[in-house]
Structures are given as C-alpha cells and as structure tokens.
Amino acid sequence: MPDLLIELFSEEIPARMQSRAAEDLKKRVTDGLVEAGLTYAGAAALSTPRRLTLAVDGLLAESPTIREERKGPKVGAPDKAIEGFLRGAGVTREQLEVRETPKGPVYFVQIEKPGRPAAEIIAEVLETTIRNFPWPKSMRWGAGSLRWVRPLHSILCILSDEAGTSVVDLDIDGIKAGNTTRGHRFMAPDEITVTGFDDYAAKLKRAHVVLDARERAEAIWQEATNQAFANGLDVVEDKGLLAEVAGLVEWPVVLMGAIDEEFLELPPEVLQTSMKEHQKFFSVKNPKTSRIEKFITVANRETADNGATILAGNQKVLSARLADAKFFWENDLRTAKSEAGMSAWVENLGNVTFHNKLGTQAARIDRIAALAREIAPVVGADADLAEQAARVAKADLSSEMVYEFPELQGLMGRYYAEAAGLPQDVANACEAHYSPLGPGDDVPSEPVSVAVALADKLDTLTGFWAIDEKPTGSKDPFALRRAALGVIRLVLENDVRANLREVFSKGYEGADADNLLTFFHDRLKVFLRDQGIRHDVIDACIAMEGNDDLTLLVKRARALEDFLKTDDGENLLQGFKRANNILSKEEEKDGVEYSFGADRKFAEHDSEKALFDALEAGGAAISPAIVAEDFAAAMRGMAALRAPIDAFFDAVQVNADNEILRRNRLNLLSQIRKVCGQVADLTKVEG
C-alpha cells in the first residue's frame, strides 16, 4: 500500500489562513479519494508560510472493481425512457436482460466498473481541489486561469512504497507535478529531491524549515521564556499572537530587544497593544513592577551578527510607533486633567451616531445614566456615583488613544478618570462596564460597576427591541444575545434581585417587555443547560410567578433539579403525573373542574385518610418555605408526599362506582396538583 505526499509551494500565505487551508486540503483530497474508492490508513496536514503539505499513509494502490445491478424501465416503455437509462448506466441495449416482476417484465442490467490506478485518481482529485480551493481571498497571475492565495510555484506529488517512488502525472496551467521542493528562502533556497514524507521532513529540517506549526510555536515560546527568565523577566502570554507569529516564519529565531527609557512609563496595556498590533512583538514585563520593559521579536533567519542588525531595525521602528502612542497618551491626559475634563469628550459624542433610529452616543449616555441611577439601589450602589460613572464611562471613545487602538476602550477610560481625580469606583466602572463580553470573561462585582454594566446592556436591548431589530436565526449583528447573557451573568453572579419587566419599563420607551423577557428566558435556558440543568426543569420554573426575577428563578430551578435526581423526587414526579393525567382526563370528560371540595369525612381507606393528612401537612410546610424562598425546605415538604401518594394509588380506585367517592377522590387529586404546583409546574417536567 503506497503512501502519498503532496506539497503546494507558493509565495507567503497569510498567517491567519494557514491552519484552515491545511485542513481544507486534507478534507478535500481525502474525501475525493474515498469517494473514488481509495481508502487509506491515516492522513496529516501541515503548513508553513510558503507551503501546504498533506501526507496520506496506507493508500490503496488502485480502486476496487465495482459490480452493481440496476433496475430499468418496464418492457414496452417509451424509447426515450429506455435510451435515457442506457446513457445513465453507460451500457448498450444488447446488455439489457428482461426479468419478470410482480408488475410485469422489467429491464435489468449488470454494470461493472473496473478499478483504476491510484495515481490516476489522485491527479483528478488534486486538480479539482486546487482549482476549487476555498481561499477567503485569491489572486490570478500570469496568463493562466488558476487562482491561488499567492502565486503558486510548484506542486510536489509522489507515491512511495517498497518498490520505490513515482511522480503523479499532473499538469495545472503549466505547473507540472514533481518530486522536488525548496528549503528556506534565504538560508537554503536550492532545489531538494525527496522520496517520501520522512525524507521530505528531514531534508526540510536540514534546509531550515520546520514543517509543523505547533512545533514552531513551542520552540518560540520555549526560547522566549528562557531569554526572559535569564533577565529576571516574564513574557506576557498571548496564545493568539503566538499562533500568528508561528505562521510568519519557517525557521524561528527568537530575539529580545529593549524599549527606550522614555516609553517605559506608558501604561503597560498601551505598550503591549501597540507592539502586538503593529510589530507582532511579545511584551516582556518586570514581575516586581508589572512594567513592560523589553520585547520579543521572532526573525525568520539566522544572521552572522546573531540578529543585532534585525533588532536595531525593529527598535527603530518600534520607537517611532511608541512615540505616536506617547503623544496620544500625553494629549489625552492633558484633556482629562483640564477644567472641562472628560465632559469635553462626552460633548464630542453628540456628533457620533450610535444607530440611525436610536440617536447619538451622547443621547445614549443620557439614557444609560438615568437607568444606572434607577438600578443603583437594587445592586447596593450609590445612585450619584452610578450616574456619574455612566456619564463618563464612554468618554474615552473620543480620546486619541482609543481612536488609534479601539480595543483599549474602557481601560483607557479608567486611566483618564483616575487622572481627572474622579472617585475610584467611577474610574473602575469605566473599564468594567463593558464586561462580561463572553462566557469566560470576568463579571464586575463592585456595585457601581454592576449598575453601569447592567444599564449599558439593558439600554442596548430595550432600544433594539423598541425598533424591532431582534436577532433572527444565526444573525445577530448587534450582539444582543451576548448582551442578554451579560445581564444574566451580572444578575446571577452578584445575586441581584430585580423584576426585569419593571426594569425594562425604565429603559428605551416602546420595548415589548414580555417579548424581551421571553428572549431572556431562552438565553437563560442555554446558560443553565451548559451547567447541567435540564431544559424541562427550567421550563417548569419559568411557568411560575416571579419569572422575571432571574435569581429567584434559578434558585428554584437548581433546587428542583437536585430534588428530581433523588428517588423521592423521581417517584413523586410519577405520582404527580399519574394524579394529573387522571384528573385532566376526567375533567375533560365531565366538563367540570375538580379544584375544591375534597372532604376527609368521605375517605374510606386508611391510605386515603393518610393522604389527606399528608397534603395538609405538606401544604403547611411548603407554602411558608416558598414565601421564604427556602426551596430546599419546599422540596423536603414535597418528598414527604411521595409515600402517601404511592400508597393511595396502590390501595384506592379513583373512579369508584359511588359518584360521591369518585368526586371526592378527584378533588383529592386536585389537592396533589395544587400543593405540588406551588414549587413548579411539574406538568412541564418530562418523565
């Protein structure tokens, strides 16, 4: 069984496209091979800035011969139908045979498709893959019609087994497949002939090319942390940057450089962002001061001066970039410390449209400030501080630094608020009010920050609901699902007790509160399902009063989830459902509602009397527990009903011949439904 090696060698592929492209190459080629009948033992795809590589092990030498029988038209069918069948099957009329079937004589044909050599199939599959490759962007060059992300220089495509190596016959727009590649562009540019994957990988390593992106990333990180450690420093971890840099080099050479003294007092986040965005440098900090003092760059070659010239050039460019950042920082600080302070930036936001139907950013800030003041008492925040924080939280959007680096919004607001001498709670809210941005993001806990964060997200949600711009399907251009999840996490993780319908009414005018609450419930179900709470349990609790108090709702759901995992809970649910099913059926049949009138004096059986007693005691235990929001105690009250309900159904026939007994027992079932229904709508729980 031969092994297949493919390499598509080109000009530099953008780092962000390499990993996906390697997987696309693997999927498209292997799917095509399997579809043509060539199975294989394993496949691996690799990438460097200049090549996509695919190695397929244990490939069949040829596709198997396929024999199949096809049923055709009836004998006597129109000639056009018969001719169409012959064309589709690739046979002649002489090859048809007639068989009797229950529906009369029908044409059948035996078709045999002989197997084909692997090389022939590979050539077809690879050409189709190359010509239809799903690059996000591609280009055409020269006189040919071929499109590729960058000019494609060569195709390596070989099959190898014990007998030797053969080149697959393939020519795409004048690029003929061969058994050669090239090493590092500068350090080993000569042609290399290979005989298989192991030979290919070893020769490329000697030619200063590390094929595996993960190996390049590990080497970069190991050397970077070693150099930093030797200087008593730490490299700031950034997995995204590491993956990107590993896609920029074939032979990583790690160099550490110094940052000019005049820039060391810039906020570390400014240094880190500027170096990452503009130079793809890693930041190196002093663990004692948390200052960014040096940088790590990764070159693509070794040099005689051990990278001194490369570092000098990088430091020169970096200094120019950081000079801009310093200029922005100092200008912004002067504005923040001026008499007008951050209010000057807020005024500028009057010229910035938030949404054409929702007004300017300044108008939005007014709404958020008013809402933050309303929310403040609910979350234990000072109302004046919450309003003050809301009014300056987005001021940094007008700053020069955030204009240059939008990802620093909020963070720079905190720095500028501190420089302006505003209370620390206000400054902290400037940074924290955007959070949480995702499921793994930290949730603000300071009351002022919580108030502003909630007001910000709730204004967004009520505003877009009011103008009927809701998420549809997978489309959510305004990130409203994320905003709702942010509200949910802020409420739950800070144990906030708020009636959302009431809060919605204080948001943007015209929002449909019930529809928006349903949206929140859907988001809550997704959030809680990820934590192991069943959807039917959540639905059972959403059906209860107070479902716009998310903290109460979740507290109830967690208690019910835990209860239903016990034997008592599982069996009580079955007893409840049995009672509810009988009751619902009889109510529908009789056209009446059996909701009151159960009288102990009509009880005949001991189990019937015991159930009366248990329901009376259960109601007395469950009702105050629900009022006190002690759902664990309410569940214990429910558990006490399990045995009496089981005993009742074992001993008593509900639909007795005596109509008085029947009505009394149906009303008793109604009592079961009423008492248990205080905890949750158990009709919505499956099982």
Image (cartoon, rainbow, N blue to C red):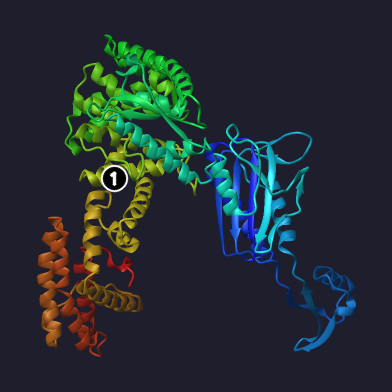
Q: In the figure, residue 606 lies in which quadrant?
A: bottom left
Q: In the image, 331: left or right of 150?
A: left
Decide which of 288, 205 is in the foreground and name it: 205
85 over 654 or under it: above or below: above
Q: Nearer the viewer, residue 611 or 530?
A: 530
- Amino acid at dot 1: Arg
Q: Quadrant of the C terminus?
A: bottom left
Q: Name the secondary structure under disc 1.
A: helix
Q: Residue 186: x and y, percent? A: 59, 31
Q: Please state if 552 lies on the left or on the right of 395 as rendered.
A: left
Q: Is residue 391 visible?
A: no
Task: Identify whether 133 is placed above or below 330.
Answer: below
> Residue 283, relative to residue 351: is it above or below?
below
* Residue 294 image-quadrant placement: top left
Q: Is residue 51 left or right of residue 297?
A: right
Residue where numbered disc 1 is placed: 489
Q: Is residue 572 left or right of residue 274?
A: left
**In the foreground, 359 or 100:** 100
Q: Quadrant of residue 143?
A: top right
